[in-house]
Image: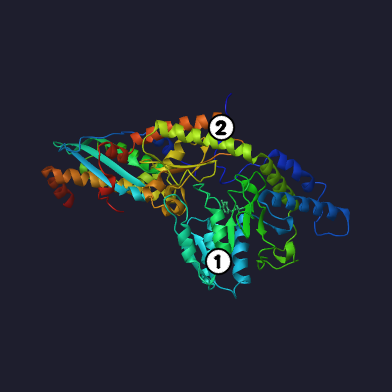
Amino acid sequence: MAIKLPIYMDYHATTPLDPRVLDAMMPYLTTKFGNAASRNHSFGWEAEEAVETARKQIADLIGANAKEIIFTSGATESNNLALKGVAEMYAERGNHIITAATEHKAILDTCKRLEKHGCRVTYLPVTASGLIDLDMLRESITDKTILVSIMYANNEIGVIQPVAEIGKICKQKGVLFHCDGVQAVGKVPVNVIQDNIDLLSLSGHKIYGPKGVGALYVRRRNPRVQVTALMDGGGHERGMRSGTLNVPGIAGLGEACALCRKEMAEESARLGALRDKLKDRLAASLDEVYINGTMESRLPNNLNISFAFVEGESLLMGINDIAVSSGSACTSATLEPSYVLKALGAGDDIAHSSIRFGLGRFTTEEEVDYVADKVIDVVRKLRELSPLYEMFKEGVDLSKVQWAAH
Amino acid sequence: MAYSNKVLDHYNNPRNVGALDKHDPQVGTGMVGAPECGDVMKLQVKVNPATGIIEDAKFKTFGCGSAIASSSLATEMLKGKTVDEALEIKNTVIVSELALPPVKIHCSVLAEDAIKAAIADYKKKNSVGNHAAAQVAQ
Ligand SMILES: Cc1ncc(COP(=O)(O)O)c(C=O)c1O
Ligand code: FES
């Protein structure tokens, strides 16, 4: 079967809408256009019913109660609401927040802003595996700590943090635990009860739902958690998030969660096998390839790999019929290599050579084979061009070379 | 980012890839950049000592497509030039020839630096080089 080009293998960035999700949304984009807050007529009632169905579908996926789901415009907003909302609501209790160096910018930049407003933030380092050290977390908690925010799975390297242990520590110490679950929800089992998560962010477009819709789970008992709203308005969503609800988006998010719940086990087994095939083929045909982050605790659909002596952007250029991303500085607007890969401590050169493959629901084995062939071919070609590979082959220790700085 | 056709052409068909014997007195080798910065360029020239003309040039580059194209183009420009003419090559020529966008200007600067470093190495190895340097100074 001829495969269709270009191939999309960047599912951590976003996912296409599942056609079944579109079907679930369509009525609310057309005939059922009511405002879910309209209490006096059937247009409002059917919109409200759709919203409550979605709330239940989301809650079921993460082991929560429907009442604990707050709809937002996406995970960036969910993360902002969780951090800023807790910082303000619990300001009397303390001002210290703990997070990790490898979090998404929606967490890190929110923390930066909170620091300007009197909060103190600890950024935990990660080990070469990409995971935080639990003892370090324990020791960082003080009587001023109000919140720990650690992501479930990393968007670049896919590593899964020891969330259940983190939740346990937070519960013991009596601090709230927020988890950015964007990359994990729908891909691996997430359960807010078992994991002792107090606030959980998720996003529609990472799980085959629409863009511009997300949710924040806010625990209602043991303990009852509250967040101060970011925006003032009609007091929707239990006063925590004002604004007329995006009913079609919410219906889509709900359906996307229901599909994930139904198909997760099978899908993750399939993608894990394909990902391993890709990894094994690359490692078998090429020398000097390095996996970034541990394989022991990782999303089944993620492969982040560095092809030493080959610069990432030049590799992307050679595989331009494959959509993937790189941690290379040359691909970023700031000309800085990935801060996530730098945090692993492997050296900037490894970040410059990294490629992130994200497999997903519509990835086929033929695509994986095509990608493996193409990447192997282009890496070989670029190594022919690489002065570093030449030196490596001559036995030069590159770490000992005096580079002319510029 | 969209690449210019010239960049794509040099990337897909790089000119003068390879290595010259760096111990040959006729060969000047320049290596600039650093792996941590994501770019390393190695550029070599082979000079006819009698005429001072660059008869061969080779490169290898670790870097983005624009860096590869800049060094590939540089080797083309070098061949047939005298050592002193080579020193006149400015990165701006590379920028306009390859239609590089502003974020890629430093890739062309690296190519200019590599040319200068290769010529400097050749001159260091050869008294002919010192003679040529004197001519430049006039
Ligand atoms: C881990 C993580 N958190 C937050 C976000 C932001 O999500 P959204 O695009 O819904 O604002 C993303 C997606 O880019 C992500 O990968
Ligand atoms: S080498 Fe990094 S942008 Fe060209």
Q: Nearer the viewer, mark 1 or mark 2?
A: 1
Give the residue number, with chain letter if any, for mark 1. A173
* Crowding at mark 1 (Cα within 10 Å: few <14, some 14-19, many 20+): some
Image quadrant containing the N terminus of chain A: top right
Query: Residue A195, position in %: x, y?
Result: 60, 55
Q: In this view, does A64 lie to the left or right of B7?
A: right
Query: Residue A335, position in %: x, y?
Result: 43, 52
* Crowding at mark 2 (Cα within 10 Å: few <14, some 14-19, many 20+): few
Q: Residue furthest left?
A: B127
Query: Residue B99, position in %: x, y?
Result: 43, 44
**Chain containing the residue with disc 1:** A
Of marks 1 and 2, which one's residue comes earlier in the chain? Answer: 2
What type is the residue that disc 2 sits on? Answer: Leu
On the question of residue A361 being in view, the answer is: no
Badge 2 element: loop
Residue at the spot 16% in from the left edge and 48% down from the top edge? B133
Foreground residue among A78 and A188: A188
Q: Which mark is residue A5?
A: 2
Q: Is residue A284 above or below residue A262?
A: above
What type is the residue that disc 1 sits on? Answer: Lys
Foreground residue among A153 and B74: A153
Q: Distance between the residues labelled 1 and 2?
A: 52 Å
**Chain containing the residue with disc 2:** A
